[in-house]
Amino acid sequence: MMQKENTAGLVLYSRNYREKDKLVKIFTESFGKRMFFVKNFAQSKYISSLQNFTSCQLLCTVNDNGFSFIDDVSQVDTLQHLSEDIFANAHASYLISLADAAISDNQYDPALYAFLTKSLQLIDEKFDKEIVTNIFEVQILNRFGISINFSDCQICHRSNLPMDFSYKYGGCLCPDHVNEDLRRLQLDPNVLYLLHQFQEIPLDQLEKIAIKPEMKKKLRLFIDGLYDEYVGIQLKSKKFLDSMDSWSDIMK
């Protein structure tokens, strides 16, 4: 079924198709992620409007059983900093890949569309990109069917205590029950406290955050462990982002 529609959209990526054509994947607000066919892309009047990280308003022909088609593009918003800064670009590319992996194509999810769009805007506005990325990773876990309580003990359900994390129990253990899992992570309790905050905070209420580099590394290691244990996806964009840590050290 094909239908003419008007919707907001965020360009995720494009790839070559045949000799001169391209397929452009766009996360639309109204119809989920769709693959759009653009003929003679280099000569298309929409070429500048269909670059990665670009938000726009689309008049399009939506096809539920194949490629969709673009009829017009307006209200184009390009995130300039993401295009110019390789580190911001890498974080944005990872968030896009994560959102792409989290839901199926054609799946209606305006909340994820808004969440991804806002996250990219914050990175473009030079908010702390590592923290925005961490918040995105934690809050999108539920799209993978993963629900983790970072504040309550899995056994007695007490909270407001320094917790450790147990993969065996799939959550936190309080000081009275940490010995229930001798292979617990022996994690810095502040990591779990911060993740609980990240899990709850709306991005539109995000203010300036100052977290020390040592704590950022602990957050990064633990979130990577969560994804390895519970999600199990391998994204090229994440591997590239990880490789950039050594670049940062060299540039310093």
Image (cartoon, rainbow, N blue to C red):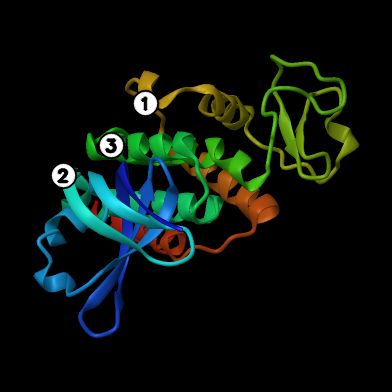
Could one spot residue 91 in this view of the protein? no
Residue assigned mark 2: 74
Front position in the image: 58 or 198: 58
Residue at the far right: name it: 180
Q: Which residue is mark 1?
A: 210
Q: Is residue 86 above or below residue 65?
A: above
Q: Is residue 210 at least partly visible in the picture?
A: yes
- Quarter occupied by residue 167: top right
Q: Amino acid at mark 3?
A: Gln
* Callout 3 secondary element: helix
- Residue 21 sits in quarter: bottom left
Estimate the x, y position of residue 242 in percent, counting from the top left: 43, 58
Q: Residues within 10 Å of mark 3 (few under 14, many from 20)?
A: some
Element on which disc 1 rests: loop
In the structure shown, which secondary structural element does the residue marked by tag 2 occupy? strand
Q: Is residue 48 left or right of residue 149?
A: left
- The kind of residue tagged 1 is Ala
Disc number placed over residue 121 in the picture, else none: 3
How far apart are the two marked residues, 2 and 1, measured between alpha carbons?
Answer: 37 Å
Compared to residue 28, the image places residue 158 above or below, namely above
